Amino acid sequence: MWQIPIVFIEVIIAYLLQTAVFTDIQMAGVVPDMLIIIICAIAYMKGRVPGTATGFFCGLLVDCTYGSVIGLFAFMYATIGYFCGYANKIFDRDDYTMPYVLIGLSELIYNLMYFVFFMVLNGKLNLGWYMVKYIFPKIIYTVFVSLLFYRLLNMQNNFFESRKNRFKKIKKEIDKEIVNENS
């Protein structure tokens, strides 16, 4: 239960970084997608359901800010969170290559979905130009930024997991003492 407020704060910080800070540090005209980094990290560390929920919340946040249709970004981000959550089965705290691959693939899939929903449906069919001018630079920039931010998220996850395990251990000892006293 304590994870929900922490994820909420992470999402708000990532959103503010994406919309306020990184807009001033654009490279090749693109901004890194901090929300994709958060969604992939949570889905990879915690599973499909938290990844989907985080993706849905991030998408609603973007929908309320930029979207003309409520729910489209929520659908795209939730889909990414769901599929990244499958990698949770092979989660290793010390493995840093898999999350970066997931973030890069997720950024590619997100941008292809964006192209279909916003460009193709508006009659703009030049996928090659869109890939070279927008998608590839955005993937590179997002993965580059994730090199730092995923490590921070992983350290935070390890800290709270160790605290949770410590509290479980203390609770077991207390329950054991209570059973011994009642016997």
Image (spheres, rainbow, N blue to C red):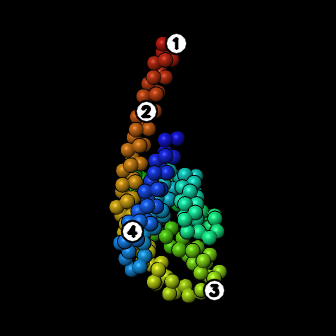
Which residue was labeled with disc 2?
A: 167
Query: Dividing the picture into quarters, in which one does residue 13 lie?
Result: bottom left
Label 3 is placed on what type of residue?
Answer: Gly
Q: Which residue is mark 1?
A: 182
Residue highlighted by disc 4:
22
Q: CA distance from mark 4 to mark 3?
A: 30 Å
As measured in the structure, the alpha-carbon distance from the residue carrying label 3 to the one carrying label 2 is 57 Å
In the rendered structure, are the residues bearing label 2 and label 4 in contact, judged by CB atoms less than 8 Å apart?
Answer: no
Eye-nearest disc, 3 or 2:
3
> Residue 59 bears which disc, if any?
none
Q: What type is the residue that disc 1 sits on?
A: Asn
Q: Separation of disc 1 and disc 2 at Cα?
A: 22 Å
Question: Residue flagged by tag 2: what amino acid is it?
Answer: Phe
Q: Amino acid at mark 4?
A: Phe
Work out whether 81 lies above or below 174: below
Mark toward the start of the polypeptide (3 vs 2)? 3
Q: Which residue is mark 3?
A: 123
